[in-house]
Image (spheres, coloured by chain):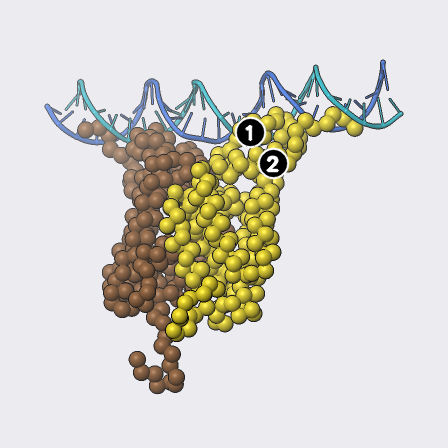
Chain colours: A yellow, B brown, C blue, D cyan
Amino acid sequence: MGRLKAFDEDRAIDRAVDRFWLRGYEATSVRDLAERMGIGGTSLYNAYGDKRALFITALARYADRSMRERIARLEKSGRPKQAIRAFLAEIIDRSLEDPDRKGCLLVNSALDVAPHDAAIGRVVADYLGELRAFFRRNLEAARTAGLVSRQTDPDELAGHLLGVVLGIRVLARTGADRAQLEAVARPALRLLDLPRRRAPARSARS
Amino acid sequence: MGRLKAFDEDRAIDRAVDRFWLRGYEATSVRDLAERMGIGGTSLYNAYGDKRALFITALARYADRSMRERIARLEKSGRPKQAIRAFLAEIIDRSLEDPDRKGCLLVNSALDVAPHDAAIGRVVADYLGELRAFFRRNLEAARTAGLVSRQTDPDELAGHLLGVVLGIRVLARTGADRAQLEAVARPALRLLDLPRRRAPARSARS
DNA sequence: ATAATTTTGTAGCGCACGCTCCAAAATCAT
DNA sequence: ATGATTTTGGAGCGTGCGCTACAAAATTAT
């Protein structure tokens, strides 16, 4: 049935994600993509269509490996408040340990390419919606388990947390340090605390 | 002393701001800029240097007219909490009433061009620092006036509010509606409220 | 072996990019 | 009026862009 592909398609996609992540959609050329993916230009078009289609594929790959994987892993613990806290903590850690300060491909794309491409805009908005749904699910669970104040509005707070994550991602890309990023997150996380009773002898961890 | 300029430099800069704001730095061509500014390509280079210099000038213009003007106006009231609330409310209103959903030029630039241009990155970070300083100043004032809880950490909360603004700007660019944007802001604004005393009855005396 | 099918590398198409050269046009001082 | 100086428009430079045509190379089915 013809000649076999000489390259690993998944591995090549991962390289494409790296380039789009680092430089953005417009600023990444097809020639640069092909070189980093270790294939020729013709093979790229043959395997993935055109640059835009490759970008959409790369976005999906990023969302799967970077966002959904994290959500699934954190949610497995069954501790909703810890899942939320750990999500923010991981975002901050990953943002700081990346020497290139790439931020989040979805956030970058939301500002860069989504506004000029309706279809990609919808894709990005859907991914962000999944993140908001993660927050909402866990807030709901925490509320019914009595782990957060009964006044907590899971929908509202989920939106707030999504906004906080986006803000952290933007600030991280500007080179903010840990103190700045944690200052963004901490007031939001404090909303998860149960109101303290009077006379705390020794505060236990929630 | 030579021929006079046939165009209004300030007006032309405003047009340049509009184009960079709508399409971003890379995606806006010098030809398009010149056309929208109503001048020839040669005049553009003669008056502003090159594309990058024009962009930096446009950024400064935007920061002056869009951010500093708002900060100064809101701060004149002398009511720090109202200034903060009004800032967020205006950001949301402006974001929603813009049919092009351009968001904020500074935020867009922070993700798009700043990471690949250290000098512009510093400029953008400085502008964001001015916004954070606005929040911090007013939180400090509110605290010494007893308008917010004495536990409030003005530095931390200023960082949080900056992050919230950035998050709102990102979400606005993805086409979020008023309910979503206000959900991001509301929990942050609630942190400005004084904690209510436990009032046993309606005639609460404090 | 042969034919059919698919992948690969090269070369290059047409186009838009940032930017510049240059001469005509317009304004100043003298 | 004259000469100096600046702005203006048009043409065009070199480069890199997304993408494709084409034929050699590699594989399967017969």
Q: Which residue occupies the foreground of this view, B183 or A26?
A: B183
- Secondary structure of the residue carrying numbered label 2: helix
Q: From where the camera sits, is residue A16 visible?
A: yes
- On the image, the x and y values in percent for residue B52 come to 36, 34
Q: Is residue B88 shown above or below D9?
A: below
Q: Which residue occupies the foreground of this view, B78 or A170?
A: A170
Q: Quadrant of the N terminus of chain B?
A: top left
Q: Quadrant of the C terminus of chain B?
A: bottom left
Quadrant of residue B49 within the rendered picture: top left
User: What amino acid is at disc 1?
Assistant: Arg
Q: Quick one: label 2, few (<14), some, or many (20+) residues within 10 Å?
A: many
Mark 1 falls within which chain?
A
Residue at 57% x, 34% y is A15
The residue carrying mark 2 is A13
- On the image, the x and y values in percent for residue B80 come to 28, 63
- Secondary structure of the residue carrying numbered label 1: helix
- On the image, the x and y values in percent for residue A178 come to 39, 48
Q: Quick one: label 1, few (<14), some, or many (20+) residues within 10 Å?
A: some
User: What amino acid is at disc 2?
Assistant: Ile
Q: Which mark is residue A36?
A: 1
Q: Which residue occupies the foreground of this view, A36 or A150?
A: A150
Mark 2 falls within which chain?
A
Q: Is residue A165 shown above or below A8?
A: below
Labels 1 and 2 in the same subunit = yes
Residue farthest to the front, as pictured: A201
Q: CA distance from mark 1 to mark 2?
A: 10 Å
Residue at 60% x, 53% y is A72
Residue at 31% x, 34% y is B48
Q: From where the camera sits, is residue B172 visible?
A: no
